[in-house]
Image (spheres, coloured by chain):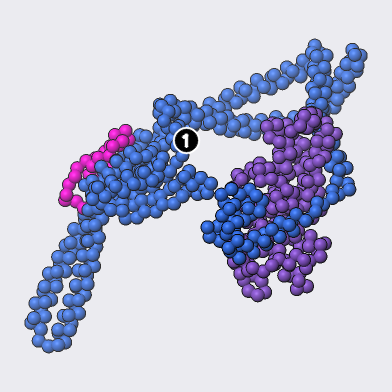
Chain colours: A purple, B blue
Amino acid sequence: MTDVEKKLIEKSKNGDVESFEKLIEKYQAIAFNIAYRMVGNIEDARDMAQEAIIKVYRSLKKFRGDSNFSTWFYRIVINNCIDMIRINNKFQTFSIDKSIITEEGSYCFEMTDNKNLPDEIVVKKERKEIVQGAIKQLPEKYRIMIVLRDLQDFTYGEISEITECPVRTVKSRISRGRLLLKELLKKEMEFYVEK
Amino acid sequence: MNCQEIRGLLSSYIDDVIEYEMKEKIQNHLEKCESCKQEYEDLVTVTKILADVSMVQLPEDFREELHSKLIECSLETDDSESQEIIHFKTKLKKFKKNMFNWKTMSWVAATVLIMLISVVGLRNFTQFPIRFSSQNQLNEVLDGEDVNYKMVSEAPAVESRAFTGVNNDQALKTAQIDMTERGVENNFEEQRKLEPSKTNTDREVILSGYMQLDVEDFDIVQEKIVNLTILQGGYIENSHIGFKYYDKQKPEDSLKTGNLIIRIPEELFYDTFNEIKNMGVVINQIINSKDITKDYRDTINEIENLKVREKRLRDIMDKAKNVKEIIEVERELSRVRGEINRYTVNIKKWDNLVSLSTIEIFLNEVDIKDNNIKAIDENIWQKAKRGFIKTTNNMINAIENLFVSFVSLLPILVSLVILAPILIYLYKKFIKTLIKKIFRRE
């Protein structure tokens, strides 16, 4: 944490809104993106991000300065996203253990059919929708990891601190999340190609 | 390394957070294994697709909206704090200015009077319920004794129970009288170590015991019980063990509970029972002795009678002359034999139950933390507990009394409510003059 940041934090604790806004200036875009990727639409993401930032403002007094401000900040954002999502129940989760039923028949997650991912076929704009749709189908705990790692490029150490999970949990969740995402993308691609 | 394991590590390999030794192994495997290599390339594609996903722009009014919300938020806290301070200061000023105003003095006097009345009224009310509760305790004791008197007058060949609980109150202590069929009375204190009073071999008694035990280490106690059972020459009839709550993160800390039903030779019943009691903290124990002598004897007599009958039937059969008579006698004979079998089975069952008594043990594993509390000196803890219970009771009494006095004061409150408009009108008049006085002095 830089000295500038420390000063801004002190001022914000005393109620100085401008200092607080300066403090979170570089983090709010990322926070918004995290929220957007977790939920899938702009409106909800905006509400969640703003609520999270206000929560940060309110709990500034509890911030002890022993961890990074950014880590603490993102932790609150993510927890807020999870809470709000649970309340609104907007998750469409995808169970790993149940078998996936497609038109051809059902298959279990464990088996991978070695088809190539046809990323050349898809136009960029549609691809974003497909990807976002696939991400939205991930179960919560994998979604967080994928969003933080592959979309926002946090390091494993940072992710471990933000989510308060040990690094091995982070590793395994990222691994399973990616595998799951690969299957989801394949499924989405199939639907798209058929269109 | 098999493919399954390799695939689990591929992600870490791609992100280069894999341990160095693993890295080489994975590289080697990928060179050899086509399917894993394909998997690896797919994963790389996935990460690339995700990396391509660009950041979304903040909506235009995001910052402004956030700003206004933050301002609101900061004002809330400021507002409430400063408001209170101002409020308090004005109150203080008012109070100082009006200290020697006789009108306020009269208000003060009035409130003091009301408080005195309410305190005196409460005191009157509080005295009764305490008497009531001690009365109740007394009744309980009497009731308990009544019940036991009834038990004495009942026929001797009847089930008798000795029920003892560890968390007993004073009232129940005196009501605990152990009635065994043999007519021996034990007091609660003496029951610490249960002993059979007269062992006699003439009566057929089915002994069964039940206890609920809190233990620190489930596995050790369970093993001890099993060993003890086998040592005493008995066997385990039933064992049911499960976790109270299985904590995946710390399986060693998960607490277990279980049910054990063991059979012990009758003469070793009490010894075994007491030994098991010492393995933990007894929450609950029941000893049940069922005297089936009468039924047993009756059944044996019945069997004797039936056997005689069988013999007679055989004699008749020898004398039978034609087939018809033989068939009838056979029918009767098989009926009689069937009954003999039935009774014999019963006898055998009873023999089994009598010679081997049953002890059912319910084990409950508790955290050592809980037991530390018991490690403290028992006397002090019991006193503290009693004091706590006492004050809680008093609190409940006080609240009850408050409610009672509130309801009884309702007529006064109702008339106050009727008078309120008049009072408010007068009050307002006086406030105006007060304000004028304040302004004059400032």
Q: Quadrant of residue A127?
A: bottom right
Question: Which residue is found at the position 19% from the left and 45% from the top?
Answer: B199
Where residue A155 sits in the image (x, y, percent)?
69, 45
Does residue A126 lie above or below B243 as drawn?
below
Quadrant of the rendering where the N terminus of chain A is positioned: top right
Query: Does residue A72 appear in this view?
Result: yes
Where residue A170 sits in the image (x, y, percent)?
63, 48
> Does residue A92 belong to the magenta stretch?
no
Query: Quick check: B309 left or right of B116?
Result: left
| Residue located beneath label 1 in the image | B369
**Label 1 environment density (alpha carbons within 10 Å; few <14, some 14–19, many ≥20):** few
Question: Which residue is found at the position 71% from the left and 49% from the top?
Answer: A148
Where residue A49 sits in the image (x, y, percent)?
78, 46
Query: Quick check: A195 left or right of A86?
Result: right
Q: How many marks?
A: 1
Q: Quadrant of residue A69?
A: top right
Question: Which residue is found at the position 61% from the left and 45% from the top?
Answer: A167
Chain of the residue displaying label 1: B
Badge 1 amino acid: Lys
